[in-house]
Amino acid sequence: MEPIIAGEPDAQSGPVIKDTDTANFAKDVIEASQQVPVIVDFRAPWCGPCKQLGPVLEKVIQEQKGKARLVKLDIDKNQQIAAQMQVQSIPAVFAFLDGRPVDGFMGALPESEVRQFVEKIVRAAADGKGSPIADALERAKAALESGDAQEAAAFYNQVLQAEPDNVAAAAGVARCLVAMGDGERARLVLDGLDDEAAKDPDVAAARTALDLLEQSEAAGDTGELEAAVAADPNNHQARIDLAAALFGAKDPEGAIKQLIESIRIKRDWNDEAARTQLLKYFEALGHGHPATIEGRRRLSAILFS
């Protein structure tokens, strides 16, 4: 694997935040993303969550000082583009690099998660699009999200052989170890990182995944917890424990379903404990994981109904 030299993406002239339409989408998004990451906000004037997310996106993009752009598109006036991107609910946000969508999320995320999302895209651009390092990291991420932790770990270790200080790869190895149930070794990897690396969003996500593994190990028997929930649907602690057990049993969809149901029944139980736990699952799984995307859609349907 050849070494690479990371560089700053070239900021194009023109505004970093703008509206677009079907006629200008190729120029404003596809072509522009060849030079600088473009974040596309699919929205509509009637959408309440869109009004919440919009100012947050604008603030975070302004912080990047030209390293990323924000393009806003009204889906009511540009239904063809929305259909091509398979936008099923809004707000929907897609990040474009090199003329293609590389990541995205749905729903009005908190500012901290929006910032993590944008910073990750900017880092991906700075790492060198198409480089061996970037390609290995992308392959590792895809393997991990598909459930193949061993293949993902092999890619991450390739990166660490070439770049021993690569924080994303170290965090990836830790997440692979968590996925394989080896929490002890995962903690050794994370504890070996310096204070600056510990602030990285990938490391934070790995620590969250490790915490969730330990919670799942202490949650109890899945069958007993399912029986407790069936006997009393309002037993929110049993639901949260069941979610932890299911997550540890490699059933994130089932875990998210239990937490969504708890939120639906009584959103504010124990200071919104179910929602807090749900956001940890989203962070551990990653923004692009199918369970995260579907979970955010269902959460938005409850919160903004």
Image: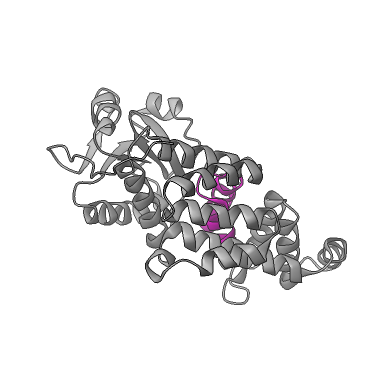
Above or below, 236 relative to 297: below
Does residue 264 belong to the magenta stretch? Answer: no
- Give the position of the N terminus as an image quadrant: top left
Q: From the viewer's perspective, is 183 left or right of 45?
A: right
Residue 121 point in image, percent of width and height: 36, 45
Residue shown at 22% from the left, 53% from the top: 62
Tell me which secondary structure the magenta stretch mostly adopts.
helix
Above or below, 294 relative to 55: above
User: Quarter-wise, where is residue 28 in the image?
Assistant: top left
Residue 50 point in image, percent of width and height: 38, 49
Residue shown at 59% from the left, 47% from the top: 153
Above or below, 59 relative to 89: below
Residue shown at 30% from the left, 39% from the top: 37
Q: Nearer the viewer, residue 305 or 291?
A: 291
Residue shown at 25% from the left, 38% from the top: 36
Residue 79 point in image, percent of width and height: 39, 27
Q: Nearer the viewer, residue 179 or 282?
A: 179
Residue 146 point in image, percent of width and height: 63, 40
Instruction: Tell me if residue 73 can be seen.
Output: yes
Instruction: Tell me if residue 302 can be seen.
Output: no
Q: From the viewer's perspective, is 155 left or right of 229?
A: left
Q: Nearer the viewer, residue 79 or 225?
A: 225
Q: From the viewer's perspective, is 169 left or right of 175?
A: left
Looking at the image, the residue that sits furthest to the bottom is 270
User: Magenta part of the protein: which range?
Assistant: 277-304
